Structures are given as C-alpha cells and as structure tokens.
Image (cartoon, rainbow, N blue to C red):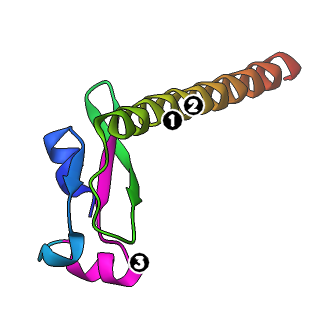
Amino acid sequence: MGTRALVERKPIHVLDAQAEPSYRAPAAQANARTMLIVPLLREGSGIGTITIWRDIVEPFTERQIELVKTFADQAVIAIENVRLFQELEARTRELVQSVGD
C-alpha cells in the first residue's frame, strides 16, 4: 500500500480508499476510508511509511499532513540513531574482545 509513497517520495492522500482499486482491499480490511501515507526517507531512500486513516470520507488538512510528515522525519532520525548505536555497540564489543585476546 505504501509503495507509491516510497516511489514518489511524497505523501499520498487518498480521499476514499475504498473507491480506489489499488487501495480497496486493504482499506476495507481496516475499515479505512480517507488515508494518508507518508514515506520515511533516509538520505532520499525509502525505508518505510507511516499510514493513518479515517473511517469516514474526510480529507486531512494541510496542517495534519505537515504534522504527520514531521512525525515521519522524527521516526527516521530515531531509526538512524538506533542503527548507529547498534554499530557502536558492535564495534565496542569487537574492541574489547581484541584487547582481551
């Protein structure tokens, strides 16, 4: 469902997902009508999406879209920080092992 947002590298706002063939099945399963799919982009590459929806047909406001985009940006920063921390831990373990040998 989020593939389009990742390919286009921009939020996808679907007014009535159950009326859109490419969104109909997953939207019906989640009882979603209006959907917003925002890509998580790290250095221009997509690493995932944040998807929110309403169970009624009602567009999201520009302010709401900007807020979800901000959440997406913060999520990417958090994911990157975890990745860097894990790399640091691995390097530290290797260094401790090499000193102990």
Is residue 36 found inside the magenta-colored segment of the image? yes
Range shown magenta = 23-40
Q: Within the image, what quadrant is residue 95 found in?
A: top right
Kindly identify which residue carries mark 2: 78
Circle 1 SS class: helix
Per the image, label 2 sits on a secondary structure element best described as helix
Residue neighbourhood size for the residue with mark 1, other residues' Cα within 10 Å, grouped as few (<14), some (14–19), many (≥20): some
Q: Residue at x 30, y 52 (%)?
A: 37
Q: CA distance from mark 3 to mark 2?
A: 27 Å
Amino acid type assigned to the residue bearing label 3 in the image: Ala
Q: Secondary structure at mark 3?
A: helix
Q: Is residue 84 left or right of residue 72?
A: right
Vertical relation: 13 (above or below) 84: below
Q: Earlier in the sequence, mark 3 or mark 2?
A: 3
Query: What amino acid is found at the position of numbered circle 2 in the picture?
Result: Ala
Task: State the residue position of label 1.
Answer: 75
Q: Quadrant of residue 41?
A: top left
Image location of residue 83, percent across then percent down: 57, 32
Q: Nearer the viewer, mark 1 or mark 3?
A: 3
Q: CA distance from mark 1 to mark 3?
A: 23 Å
Q: For this rendering, which residue is in front, 84 or 63?
A: 63
Task: Determine the residue positioned at 51% across, 26% down.
Answer: 77
Tally the numbered discs.
Answer: 3
Residue visible at 14% across and 42% down in the picture:
8
Mark number for residue 30? Answer: 3
Where 89 falls versus 6 (above or below)? above
Q: Label 2 crowding class (10 Å Cα cut-off): few <14, some 14-19, many 20+?
A: few
* Rendered view: 53 above or below 11: below
- Indicate the position of residue 26 as horizontal and vertical percent values: 31, 77
Label pair 1/2, CB-CB below 8 angstroms: yes
Q: CA distance from mark 1 to mark 2?
A: 5 Å
